[in-house]
Structure formats: structure tokens, C-alpha cells
């Protein structure tokens, strides 16, 4: 278990008290963060819908301007020398558009109105998708985001049919709008810092991006795999999402809205860290205040710890002195509270401990003397005495027991019961192997009291010994068995001595009968077997 000093414990206590405040602070921050994100996304969604309406108006304006140009009688002549100068003059009066061009029904250029680009060589657009669509539908078309050739820029073309006398298209008028001209319309919009607007066609290819006003065509496809943008184009419904900006790699909060009447979509995005900067600034302010409170509480905890640590240190020193055996360790605590009462109690306890120590030493000396006497008695007993623990292991014996087992010290006693049975080959007197439950020490540990139980034991030198054992359990004050004790006596010689006495008696009786044939056994000489002490 971790051990802490009182200073650390008080400091931890103050910190733990402040943890709920920190938890509430974090919970409040997360709630504010979620609400702010929702508010920003909602505001961006409204902005995206507003911009989409403006984009639709811009497309409508380009188509309306193209209709006006297409209905000009001079345009319908499709005469290149006349149209080139006439179209250049129109472009000077219409700064919203990059250039105006006229093409015949086969897609060959018949008039070029860009003041900064030459008309020659003439451009051919017969293979362009939007041109074929205009000729097939006889209706104006807004092209997809294209790479304009003069100059090399990303842009959009509004293509309007030029109708002949029979109402069939004899050519088209192309109003070309560069991406920077589209983006310029929204530069002065009331946007937040780092907020950007972009316009994407039906394939999610960018026509403009206010963060990259001169958008190269190679970069216009960076948003083609953006899920929320594709969903706004397919579902024709506004979308909001947090996404990774493909141009910058930053996490952005964005809103996407379809353009009314056109298969285009507008996107509004802002870097997440910029949008949520006020929330994080508020969090830093709150964390700073929390840190100040934590510092103040830490100083207060240290002051309280010092005021309480001194009495505790005095008690600690007094306890250590008492442990060293000093009779009256000095304890002088004057705090006027429970610590002072504890010091007074400690002094009384130290005096009582000193008195008890004297009594214990006297009792110990007496017990030691008795133990020495008991050990001397046990050592002098000729019978082997064994003590066994509850798991059946012999844990102690006297010198007679060591001699019986043929070992030199108690360190060799710690063997299990199967090991004893295998090593000493314990058997019944008639030679039958002894079961573990029949071993005297097991019987004693089982609570049995017995005397004169005989068994055979094979000594270390290979001799077969006949033993007689007495056993009993040792119980504690509650009556629980804590040890087993057995006393073993070697009775190997007794049967042999009885046999010798019997043989000697028979020999003496035979000699008496030989010397005095008329006498009965035990008569005539005044000597009996019992008087000679030879009977068993």
C-alpha cells in the first residue's frame, strides 16, 4: 500500500475536493463547444443558402445578358470582322464577364470579344458537351467548371442559342466567367476571418474558391470526393458537417446548399479552431482561475499540514524512543485540541508500558529457567519424543529421537509422511506395511490417545527395530488440535531376552532332574525358578 506523509495527504484531500469543480468546468466547456458548433453550422447553412440564391441570380444574369447579345441583329450576321470589334466593345461595357464569343452551328468561332486575347487562331467547340446540349435543346446552358483556354483559367461558360428566322439555332453566344471573377462577387461579403465560399458543379468540381481566387484547373477537383458536398448535389437539400479541407488539410466546419434551378452547390467553410477560438479562450480563462484556486488551496493545505505535522512528529519520535527502551520519552504537545489529549494519553501509556516491561522481564526469566529445566529433562529421557505439525511433518525431537532415526539434527526432520514411510519402511509387528492413517503420529493428530502401539521400523543401517509408541494430541486453550506428540521406546531386545530366560530355565530344570531323578521339577533343592529371578 502506498505510504504518504501528512503533507501529501492533506494536499491530495484538497485536490480531490476540487475535482468535482474541474469536472463541472469540463462538462460546461463541452456543452458550450457543442452549442457553439451547432450555432456556427446553422449560421453557415443560412449563409450557404443565401449565396446559392445569389449564384442562381448570377447565372440568370449571364443567361439574360447572353439572350440580349444573341438577339442583336449584328450578331446574327455571324460576320467575323464585324463581330470581333463589336464584341470587344461589349466586354468593355460588361466587366462582370471575361469575354464574349460567337460560334456558328458547327462550333466554329465567328466572333471573339476578349480585348486582351487575339481572335486568331479561331477556336472550335463543336465537341464540347455544353455546346451540343444547347444545339439539341435550343435552350441556354450553364456549363460545368471548365479550363478556359484564353487565358488558362478555371471558369464557367453560359451558352445561349442564336435563333434564326425559323427559330432554329444558327449558333451560340458564349459568356465566359473566370473563377476569380466569380469569387470577386463575394470578397466583400460579411464573412468571418478565414471563412471561405466555394461553388461546385454537378461533379463536385470547383468553379471558384474564395481562399484561392486564381484557382488552377488542376486543383478544381480536390473536393470531388467530399461526402457532404456530393449529398447536397444528389439530395438537393442543405447539409452541415465537420470535414477535412482537401486544400489545406485543416478540420473545417462547413455547410452546403444546392443552387436553385441549377445542378450546382455552394459551400461555406471555416477552420474549426478559428470558429471555436472564443470557446477555447473562455476555457483557458476558466482553467487559469481554477489553477489559481488550486494554488491557493495547496498553500492552505501545506500550512495546515505543518501545523499538524509537528505534534505528529513529536509523537513519532516519542514512539521510536519507547521502542528503543527509553522509560519516559518526552512528549510536550500544547495545541489545545485532540492532539494535546493524545500526547497526554501517550505519556500515560509509556509509563504503563515501562511497568509492564518490568513484569514481563521477570516472567520471561522465570519461563526461560523452566524451559531450560524442561529441555534438560526431555533430553535425558531415554525414549524418543516426536512433535508433529498439523500437516503431518515432524518438527522436533529429543536426542533419543535423533539416534532412533539416525540423523544428526532437527533440520533433517522436515519430511512429508510418504517420505517417512518410504525411508523407514514402517510396518506392523507381523510385517504388514503400515497405512498412512495407521501411523502413530497421524493417529495423534486425528485426536486419538493410545499406548503400547507396536510397529517395526527399518533403521538407517538396515536393522529392523521393534518399537512401542504412546501418542496424544496437543490442544490450545480453545480445544483445537495444534500439535501431535508421540513417545517411542525401542523394545527390540525384549523378545530375545524372554527367549534367553526361557532357555536358561529349561536348562537348569533339566540339570536338577538329572542330579535327582526322583524329584519333581521345582522340588528337592529348595531352589525355584522364581527365586532365581529367571521367569518371564
Image: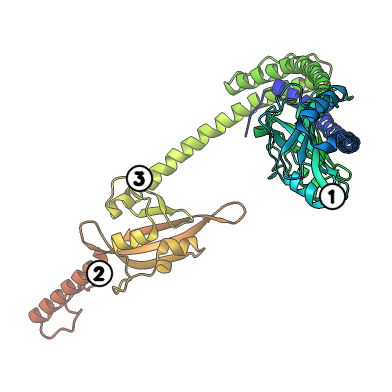
Q: Position of residue 71 (x, y in %)?
A: 90, 38
Nearest the viewer among 507 and 118 is: 118
Q: Which mark is residue 411?
A: 3
Q: Which mark is residue 495?
A: 2
The N terminus lies in quadrant: top right
User: How many other residues sit within 10 Å of disc 2, few (<14), some (14-19) or many (≥20)?
Assistant: few
Q: Is residue 118 left or right of residue 520?
A: right
Comes first in the chain, label 3 or label 2: 3
Q: Position of residue 374 (x, y in %)?
A: 44, 43
Give me the C-alpha separation between circle 1 and circle 3. Answer: 122 Å
User: How many other residues sit within 10 Å of disc 1, few (<14), some (14-19) or many (≥20)?
Assistant: few
Q: Residue at x 12, y 81 (%)?
A: 513
Identify the element where label 3 is drawn: helix
Q: Is residue 345 left or right of residue 138?
A: left
Q: Quadrant of residue 183?
A: top right
Viewer-nearest of labels 1 and 3? 1
Nearest the viewer among 355 and 35 is: 35
Q: Residue at x 71, y 37 (%)?
A: 146
Identify the element where label 2 is drawn: helix
Note whether 132 is above or below 28 in the view shown.
below
Comes first in the chain, label 2 or label 1: 1
Q: How is the image coloured?
A: rainbow
Q: Are marks 1 and 3 in contact (CB under 8 Å)?
A: no
Nearest the viewer among 276 and 137 is: 137
User: How many other residues sit within 10 Å of disc 3, few (<14), some (14-19) or many (≥20)?
Assistant: few
Q: Residue at x 32, y 65 (%)?
A: 426
Q: Which mark is residue 229?
A: none
Give me the C-alpha separation between circle 2 and circle 1. Answer: 146 Å
Name, please, the residue furthest toward the bottom.
Answer: 518
Q: Which residue is under mark 1?
A: 168
Q: Quadrant of residue 239?
A: top right
Give me the C-alpha separation between circle 3 and circle 2. Answer: 34 Å
Amino acid at each position: 500500500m502506498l505510504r504518504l506523509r501528512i503533507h501529501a495527504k492533506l494536499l491530495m484531500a484538497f485536490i480531490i475536493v476540487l475535482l468535482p469543480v474541474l469536472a463541472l468546468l469540463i462538462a460546461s466547456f463541452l456543452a458550450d463547444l457543442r452549442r457553439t458548433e451547432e450555432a456556427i453550422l446553422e449560421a453557415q447553412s443560412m449563409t450557404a443558402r443565401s449565396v446559392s440564391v445569389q449564384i442562381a441570380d448570377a447565372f440568370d444574369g449571364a443567361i439574360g445578358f447572353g439572350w440580349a447579345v444573341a438577339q442583336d441583329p449584328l450578331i446574327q450576321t455571324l460576320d467575323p470582322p464585324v463581330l470581333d470589334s463589336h464584341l470587344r466593345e461589349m466586354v468593355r461595357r460588361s466587366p462582370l464577364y471575361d469575354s464574349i464569343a460567337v460560334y456558328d452551328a458547327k462550333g466554329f468561332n465567328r466572333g471573339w470579344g476578349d480585348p486582351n486575347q487575339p481572335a486568331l487562331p479561331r477556336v472550335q467547340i463543336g465537341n464540347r458537351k455544353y455546346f451540343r446540349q444547347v444545339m439539341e435543346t435550343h435552350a441556354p446552358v450553364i456549363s460545368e467548371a471548365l479550363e478556359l483556354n484564353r487565358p488558362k483559367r478555371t471558369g464557367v461558360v453560359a451558352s445561349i442559342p442564336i435563333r434564326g428566322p425559323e427559330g432554329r439555332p444558327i449558333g451560340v453566344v458564349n459568356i465566359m466567367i473566370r473563377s476569380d471573377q466569380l469569387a470577386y462577387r463575394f470578397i466583400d461579403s460579411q464573412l468571418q476571418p478565414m471563412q471561405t465560399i466555394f461553388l461546385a458543379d454537378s461533379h463536385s468540381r470547383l468553379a471558384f474558391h474564395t481562399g484561392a481566387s486564381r484557382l488552377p484547373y488542376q486543383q478544381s477537383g480536390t473536393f470531388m470526393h467530399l461526402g457532404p458536398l456530393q449529398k447536397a448535389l444528389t439530395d438537393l437539400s442543405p447539409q452541415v458537417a465537420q470535414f477535412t479541407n482537401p486544400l489545406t488539410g485543416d478540420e473545417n466546419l462547413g455547410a452546403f446548399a444546392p443552387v436553385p434551378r441549377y445542378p450546382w452547390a455552394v459551400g461555406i467553410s471555416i477552420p474549426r479552431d478559428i470558429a471555436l477560438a472564443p470557446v477555447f479562450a473562455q476555457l483557458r480563462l476558466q482553467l487559469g482561475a481554477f489553477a489559481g484556486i488550486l494554488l491557493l488551496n495547496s498553500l492552505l493545505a501545506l500550512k495546515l499540514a505543518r501545523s499538524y505535522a509537528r505534534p505528529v512528529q513529536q509523537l513519532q519520535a516519542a514512539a521510536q524512543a519507547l521502542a528503543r527502551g527509553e522509560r519516559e520519552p518526552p512528549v510536550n504537545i500544547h495545541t489545545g485540541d485532540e492532539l494535546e489529549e493524545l500526547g497526554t494519553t501517550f505519556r500515560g501509556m509509556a509509563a504503563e508500558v515501562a511497568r509492564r516491561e518490568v513484569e514481563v522481564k521477570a516472567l520471561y526469566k522465570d519461563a526461560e529457567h523452566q524451559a531450560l529445566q524442561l529441555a534438560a529433562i526431555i533430553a535425558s529421557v531415554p525414549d524418543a519424543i516426536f512433535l508433529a505439525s498439523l500437516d503431518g511433518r515432524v518438527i522436533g525431537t529429543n536426542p533419543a529421537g535423533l539416534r532412533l532415526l539416525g540423523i544428526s539434527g532437527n533440520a533433517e526432520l522436515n519430511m512429508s509422511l510418504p517420505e517417512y514411510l518410504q525411508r523407514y519402511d514402517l510396518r506392523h509387528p507381523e510385517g504388514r506395511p503400515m497405512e498412512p492413517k495407521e501411523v502413530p503420529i497421524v493417529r495423534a493428530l486425528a485426536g486419538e490417545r493410545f499406548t503400547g502401539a507396536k510397529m517395526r521400523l527399518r533403521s538407517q543401517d538396515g536393522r529392523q527395530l521393534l518399537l512401542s509408541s504412546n501418542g496424544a494430541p496437543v490442544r490450545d486453550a480453545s480445544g483445537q488440535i495444534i500439535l501431535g506428540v508421540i513417545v517411542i521406546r525401542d523394545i527390540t531386545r525384549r523378545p530375545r531376552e524372554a527367549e534367553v530366560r526361557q532357555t536358561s530355565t529349561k536348562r537348569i530344570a533339566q540339570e536338577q532332574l538329572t542330579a535327582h531323578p526322583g524329584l519333581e521339577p521345582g522340588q528337592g533343592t529348595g531352589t525355584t525358578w522364581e527365586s532365581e529371578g529367571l521367569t518371564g
